Image (tube, grey):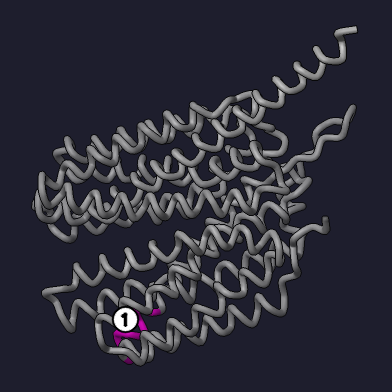
Amino acid sequence: MFRAPERAEKLAARGLYEATSRARNLRALDCLNSFKADAQATFGPYLAIYLLTIRHRRLDQIGPAMAIPGIVTMAAQTPAGALVDRIRRKRELTALCGAVIAAACLQVVYARGVAAVAFAQAVFSAAAIILPPTIAALTMGLVGPRAFAQQMGRNEMISHAGAVAGAVGAGAIGYRIAQRSIFYLAAVMSVGAAAAAMAIRAGDIDHDLAREAVVAPGEKEYIAAPRELLADRRIMIFAVSVILFHFANAAMLPLVSEMLSRRQPGFAVVYASACILVAQAVMVPVAWAAGRWSSRWGRKPVFLIAFIALPIRAVLFATMSTPGLLVSAQALDGISAGIFGVVSVVMMGDLARGTGRFNLLQGAIATCVAIGGSISNLMAGFVVQRAGFGLGFLTLGAIALLALTFFHVAIPETKPPR
């Protein structure tokens, strides 16, 4: 006669445990995103300054060291995605990357030669490119496809907030204490990211969902061959759209920084920092909204907003000369990048559904990002050198219009029906 109440109590206790476990996992995921962004925002931008002013290295020595992240990204991004798909211990892999990044930060402080610094850069870059697909995979494995868009919006919101906090904290510590303290801060944040990853309960991660594999009861797991991804017309269109997006976007901020450096060299660093902080601050609410809007309206209309902001920003940069207005126009970069960081990953989840190749696709698209960015900087530098900044920005604006048109016409909506 007491079985029904006892069963109800057990079910209630189980529901409470699951809710508590879910809340704990999501808090750990929040901490992971924040600490990871702190470390990355701290390490990269200040390395060149540290090598120049504290280590007194020549520019021809600093240049090759600073070029390493791009080379590593181009070579290793797609294999890194394939690794994340294959390995089931994604939580441990994330923690290992955090520990490796911490070691690389300390290596920079104690390195005596340029070769040792270059090695630290390579190690840092290799670990850093694994983190985005692992975090996306952990998110998918924890919340599932239905809640993925909103949770990715939250991930990116916290990540951008962490980047702002990291930049401000690093600037304050470097100014008040010592520049090498910046790298100690980055190492501590990386260890925090590793601890946060390990705080996620391993049993709560669905590793089939984490790679977008569909396993029916009693059937063997299906994993698509890479050539099957290449045969999907939607994936190829999306890859071309990503290359065009970054072809138009990547060179804008460096060109603005260079233009401000020539016009007001005494305040160039201040204006460049302001451009970065304005964009990152705008990304915080935009990323949160992008996750919610893409769940309600669909992926394509939200992504179109990011494409529309690109030509507007290019025209503003081409026609403005006041530093304050140029910095303000960087808010449009916050809109574009904030939406891209969320909706591109959500669309990749849609496109990879049932293939088991979600993280491989992330790595391949990240390679497309690097390709578009490299072409953008090469082309923009060539045009500006021969025709000036105005025509350089207008050329990027024309490419942005091409990207907008191509995306609007060619890509279908990827949001699955309810």
Q: In the picture provided, is 74 more to the left or to the right than 280?
A: right
Determine if the magenta segment contains residue 368: no
Name of the residue lying farthest toward the front: 1
The span picked out in magenta is 380-387
Q: Residue at x 60, y 58 (%)?
A: 291
Q: Position of residue 85 (x, y in %)?
A: 63, 38
Q: Is residue 79 visible?
A: no
Q: Secondary structure at mark 1?
A: helix
In the foreground, 311 or 54 = 311
Name the side, left or right, on which 392 lies relative to 301.
Answer: left
In the rendered image, the quadrant that contains the C terminus is bottom right
Residue at point 43%, 71% (across, down): 333
Residue 246 visible, this orientation: yes
Above or below, comparing residue 188 to residue 161 in the picture: above
The residue that label 1 is drawn on is 326
Most foreground residue, 414 or 164: 164
Left or right: residue 30 versus residue 210 is left
Instruction: Using residue 109 as the reference point, say whether residue 26 is left or right of it.
Output: right
Residue count near mark 1 (Cα–Cα under 10 Å), binned few <14, some 14–19, many ≥20: many
Question: Type of residue at label 1?
Answer: Leu
Residue 376 placed where, x, y %?
44, 73
Q: Residue 350: where, in percent of width, then height?
A: 72, 55
How many numbered marks appear? Answer: 1
Which of the 4 image quadrants contains residue 223?
top right
Q: Residue at position x 84%, y 30% from top?
A: 220
Instruction: Return the x and y of residue 298 as percentages of the image width and height.
Output: 71, 65
